[in-house]
Amino acid sequence: MALGANLGDPHAQLRRAVERLAALGTVAARSAIYETAPVGGPPGQPPYLNAVLELRPRPELDEPRRLMTALLAIERELGRVRAERWGPRVIDLDLLDLGGLVVALEGVSLPHPRLHERAFVLAPLCEVAPAWRHPLLGEDACALLDRLPRSGVRRTDLAW
């Protein structure tokens, strides 16, 4: 699970999101919080705070569409309004993987279709789950990260 925010108080938003996510299952691991430059979207956005956590969903949510519905509900509860693609946001919750499933349904694709292209996701993922392997590419998170430039991705000392 990837988390990101760059509007309002991003640090507080990430913490609120983790509290809500814990109600969906067990938060087994959390990365450090990273400050990252915006990728895509309109120019002039403030930097993001990003993190990755390992969520073990409750059995009734261990299905991609149900879990995605729950994630979108948390985003709405925390004030997310989807105004423009890759625009600034108070919170973004991305489902990266769910037990290695490969899924292409309306509204949910697993693994996340761009995670292997995003250092701001792979840096915290490599920290949390270095042995995780991309279900389609077969490579681990750290190997995928090694292929990407890491400029604009900085580990912070912000506490959870």
Image (cartoon, rainbow, N blue to C red):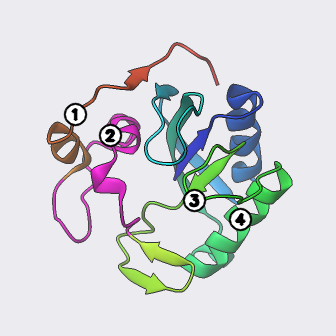
Mark 2 vs 4, N-terminal side: 4
Residue at 32% x, 40% y: name it.
119
Task: Name the residue tied to disc 4.
Answer: 72
Q: Are marks 1 and 2 in contact (CB under 8 Å)?
A: yes
Residue 25, above or below 150: below
Q: Are marks 3 and 4 in contact (CB under 8 Å)?
A: no
- Residue 32 position in % (x across, y down): 49, 27
Residue at 64% x, 43% y: name it.
88
Q: How many marks?
A: 4
Tell me how far mark 2 sits from mark 4, CA to CA: 23 Å
Q: Which residues are magenta?
A: 111-139
Task: Name the residue tied to disc 2.
Answer: 119
Query: At label 1, which amino acid type do we have?
Result: Pro
Residue 63 visible somewhere in the drawing: no
Indicate the quadrant where residue 46 lies.
top right
- Residue 69 position in % (x across, y down): 70, 73
Badge 4 marks a residue whose secondary structure is helix
- Residue 12 position in % (x across, y down): 75, 29
Tell me how far mark 3 sits from mark 2, CA to CA: 19 Å
Query: At label 2, which amino acid type do we have?
Result: Ala
113 in magenta: yes
Indicate the quadrant where residue 67 lies.
bottom right
Query: At label 3, which amino acid type do we have?
Result: Arg
Q: Nearer the viewer, residue 57 or 156?
A: 156
Q: Are marks 1 and 3 in contact (CB under 8 Å)?
A: no
Which mark is on residue 14? none
